[in-house]
Amino acid sequence: MSAPTDAQRMEKIVSLCKRRGFIFQSSEIYGGLNGAWDYGPLGVELKRNLKNYWWRVIVHERDDVVGMDGAILTHPAVLKASGHVEGFSDPMVDCLITGKRFRADQIDGQSGQIAEFVGAVDALSFHKLTREGETPERSTIWSKTDIAPALRMVFKNQSGGFRGEEGSGFVEFGDVPEAKLDSLRKLIEQNLFTSASLQPFSALDMTGDLKNFVSISKRGFNPTIKLAQEFYEKRGVPFPVVFMLRPKTVENTKRYNPENGALLTEPRPFNLMFKTYVGATEDESSIAYLRPETAQSIFVQFKTILEVSRKKLPFGIAQIGKAFRNEINPRNFTFRSREFEQMELEYFCRPEQAIELLEYWKNERLKFYENVGISRANLHVRNVPDEERAFYSKGTYDIEYDFPFGRQELEGVAYRTDYDLLQHQKASGKSLEHFDDEAKERFIPHVVEPSAGVDRTILALICDAYAEDQAPNDKGEMESRVVLRFHPRMAPIKCAIFPLLKNKEPLVAKAKEIVALLRPHMTVFYDEGGAIGRRYRRQDEIGTPFGVTIDFETLGEKDPALRDTVTLRDRDSMKQERVAIEDLPSILRERIR
Ligand code: GAP
């Protein structure tokens, strides 16, 4: 079952991200670089919180996992051995009109009428020949006996339509298309048409594997005629009169551009890796790749790391870092980017332990997402069927999230068998075998890999946290507010500090003291501008879970017992509690851990 989509909600989220400094389009002042994003002051804090928490639970809180930080520039031999140079590709197709590129496997099926066009000639020549056909005995062209039958075949009893009497249009080739097409070819060979005489046969015999143009439409065939005219015009026929075969109805086809209905080219593989050159020469010998996943450097260093860390199997190596893929269609905000970060764990084990560990890691990873505040109801586990899995994988779970644009993968948890280590052993000639002291045997370890995307998880965190509700303003009237209900452990700013009035020096001084007290423990934000309700609203919108207000009670002006206490406001319940300033660090530390 797929989740319903909500484009409006997504638009609001993207706009909030930009307005409040979470995520911006990269190189925006130059028109933007498609598929690349910059994280602003709040976005970078959110990202750090996520990565730190992943590192904490995967590496620091475990005995059986160590970390590494590998290079992004990767030797081609590594990626040849892993299969990326040959096989890391997506099927791509191009629109014959706009040239826009799509991933063939991401095109939704369409149903409608398809119209096939077998060619076109320019309107000027077409109308001249049609007119002369009305009095053939007075026309030098129609009087040529060798082409008169062909002229009659194409120009007599046409059914079609034209834009104005002399304009571009279409002719239906009806029941005997082959005979009509042969006649048309014959006439083109005689150089009877302006465009054809410049470039004989150009409109009918295009380069490439397509001679004809086909398009689909759900609303009659007028749009398809317009598209066909654009197609032939781009190929040198001015004001084209297009020749159309009788339209047919088709169901659920993926051969047409979903945006304009034009036929797409046949799918061809497109390698997703970014290639670069290392050093001063640009030739075959200096090629390197930007890594398409962090995993390969872990496999390549597996043996060294196992030795230096003196661990026993099962044992894991974790890495967080950038990966690069030249995605055909980056889309859905940061969801599919060309530069992104991964959090990957390669967990090495004996073959007989792998299936159990696959279940274990799937459950651990689900717990992780709940612990960073993503609602369990929006998380789903998909058991990836055999035909969709990599050939070497003996089991894969996708952990999916209900984004506003639909249910999509956040993380893959895959049993990769011994494939990667075996490949690198074969290609490098270096043994990657492990010697098991207890069993006294040598073998290539098997691997279970939980591989998560930082950027996708950040997007899921923001989508899950985004809410609109009602909150009282300074006059006690309810008004709508936008709030990011981040889990306190993920929130970019943990606590906002507000002196009730900015022109009351003792309030301001106390507030600044509290900033200094909390700053070593957490991110804080000091705000003295505007009514207190407005200040709360600004913090709610960026997901700050706690707000501390310094008021006259804090100064002991109303009740000496309340001296050095402050109100601590909770973002979600909007409840306020009175707490001693000296207790603030421990209370807040406990809640944000
Ligand atoms: N080492 C295995 C691996 O890389 P993957 O399913 O291709 O597997 C793992 O990628 C995760 O990386 C995905 O689940 C996703 O979260 C993230 N990811 C992959 N491609 C991405 C892209 N183009 N943009 C953002 N995140 C991406």
Image (spheres, rainbow, N blue to C red):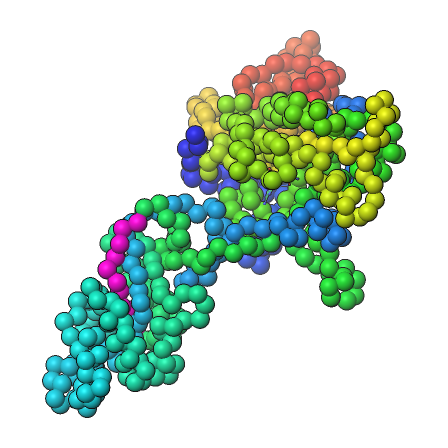
Looking at the picture, how far across and down is residue 181, in whole percent? 27, 72
Could you say which is closer to the camera, residue 278 or residue 76? 76
> Quadrant of residue 396 in the image?
top right
Write the start and end of the magenta stretch as one range: 239-250
Q: The C terminus is located in which quarter?
A: top right
Could you say which is closer to the camera, residue 75 or residue 582? 75
Q: The N terminus is located in which quarter?
A: top left
Q: Residue at x 73, y 66 (%)?
A: 283
Looking at the picture, how far across and down is residue 224, in whole percent? 30, 59
In the visual, does 13 lie left or right of 318? left
Magenta segment, prevailing SS (helix, strand or loop): strand
In the visual, does 483 lie left or right of 194? right
Quick check: 199 above or below 334?
Answer: below
Residue 494 visible in rendering: yes
Q: Which residue is drawn at 55% across and 50% down?
A: 90
Q: Residue at x 70, y 59 (%)?
A: 276
Looking at the picture, how far across and down is residue 154, in whole percent? 21, 74
Q: Which residue is drawn at 74% across and 49% down?
A: 78
Residue at the outermost top position: 561
> Quadrant of residue 156 in the image?
bottom left
Looking at the picture, how far across and down is residue 243, in whole percent? 27, 68
Q: Does the magenta stretch include residue 78?
A: no
Could you say which is closer to the camera, residue 190 or residue 71? 190
Q: Ligand 1 falls in which quarter?
A: top right
